[in-house]
Amino acid sequence: MEINAGDTAWVLASAALVMLMTPGLAFFYGGMVRVKSVLNMMMMSFITIAVVTILWVVVGYSLTFAGDTGHVIGNFSEVGLQGLLDPKAVSGTTPTLAFVAFQLMFAIITPALISGAIADRATFRGWIAFVIGWTCLVYFPVAHSVWFLDKGNGGWIGDKLKAVDFAGGTAVHLNAGAAALALAIVLGKRVGWKKDPMRPHSLPLVLLGAGLLWFGWFGFNAGSALSAGTTASVTFVNTQVATAAAVIGWLIVERLTHGKATTLGMASGAVAGLVAITPSCGAVTPLGAIAVGVLAGAICAFAVSLKYKLGFDDSLDVVGVHFVGGLFGSLAIGLFGSAAAPSAVNGLFYGGGVTQLGRQALANVVVAIYSFSVAFILGKVIDKTIGFRLTEDDEVTGVDQVEHAETAYDYLSAAGLRGALAARPVAAPAPAAKDNDATEPTEKAEVDA
């Protein structure tokens, strides 16, 4: 096929939008942790950008999209993006390198999502080692299995099983959520969990991050159409509709259970909706997207409380939002899928029976088990070798100081400024102005001001 300039522009712009999501995630997670951990939390996202970019160029793209080996992985034929600079290297209606750039951004944000589950207590070197290992062992083969389509000769999930994952509910969110649960178990609970207050230190940062994620997600979902046309338009509208509905669903649950609707709940509800509509945005109608969003917001709002009952410390609710939201969004295709939407599958409520629901369930169960198992083993190996969990003393001191020798806010300077202002001599009060010059301060008043 010939290269289409409009499609190429859309894919490259979408890649930039998805790239913005990882810094947005850094703000979202950074605002949710305590003040002594904010820099480390943001660094975990930013270092993922650096590490995964190199992995993707050297070997990742080739293992994900260069041919098929056993329906689970690619091959080494395009290592180092060999041959892809050729003007004849085309993917659909865009240069292959545009597709490479777009898919890179998905590879970056997926492991970054995991970091929220281990906030406050992971060594930076341990995190880097985990990102390298998990991305190579889990993300590349899962992404291949879901998205490498070759007329029945591609990945086992998308091409053989025919499970639908338009933009990453299985490959990204459930995949990351399962690994997050494994790491939360491996690293254990934070010091003082359930006893000490661990409230977000900056809700404005959380809302900023949520806003950037919402904005970037249009590239995530609509960009996955890989062309500027009807499919991109449908997925764009469904993304907006479901996210708005999820905010309402989450806030209703908050209001009923706690009596208040919170800003943190609003931000979390938006992310839950974005996660749930990701796999299904090409499979449902806008009315179906409302149903997906409302239910995702409500279900994830309940799910985040399960960690206290089950006893695992998922610091920033990665499991409750991404694992549960990704799973529900994928299963929702088997319920609300409509043949009128671009993915052209009918779910149970549209006369399609339970066939598609079964496909979705099987794909997600297998990916969840695989991702959890590899992450658990990898986390244990890293902890026993180079160290993954901070010592108790270092955790109490604060991971920012221990791992990066920095603090997010210079409280000493602020305290010094307050002291200087307190010690400043107080000027004598200005004489009261007369009635006829109330709007014109006297010379003395001007000096004092």
Image: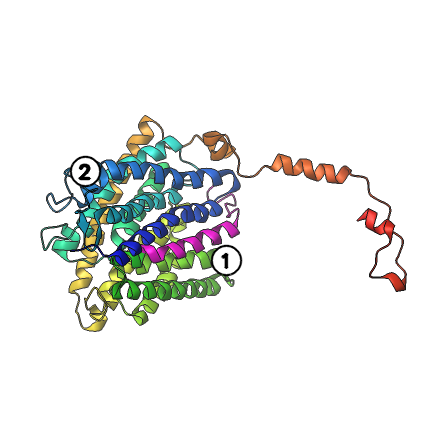
The picture quadrant where one finds residue 415 is top right
Q: Residue at x 30, y 39 (%)?
A: 52
The majority secondary structure of the magenta stretch comes to helix
Position above or below: 48 against 3: above
Q: Which residue is mark 1?
A: 263
Q: Is residue 427 visible?
A: yes
Badge number at residue 235: none
Number of residues whose C-alpha sits closer than 10 Å to that of mark 1, classed few (under 14), some (14–19) or many (20 or more)? some
Question: x, y percentage for residue 448?
Answer: 82, 47
Where is residue 364? Give x, y as percent: 22, 53
Q: How is the image coloured?
A: rainbow
Quarter of the image with the N terminus in it: bottom left
- Camera-nearest residue between 394 and 81: 81
The local secondary structure at tag 2 comes to loop
Give the SS element for disc 1: helix
In the image shown, does 308 or 413 lie closer to the viewer?
A: 413
User: Is residue 202 on the magenta stretch?
Assistant: yes
Q: What crowding class fits label 2: few (fewer than 14 Cα within 10 Å), some (14-19), or many (20 or more)?
A: few
Give me the residue at 21% from left, 72% from top: 350
Furthest residue in direction top, as rendered:
385
Image position, residue 76 (x, y; %): 15, 37
* Residue placed under numbered mark 2 in the picture: 82
In the image, which residues are magenta? Answer: 193-220
- Quadrant position of residue 83: top left
Residue type, label 1: Thr
Amino acid under disc 2: Gln
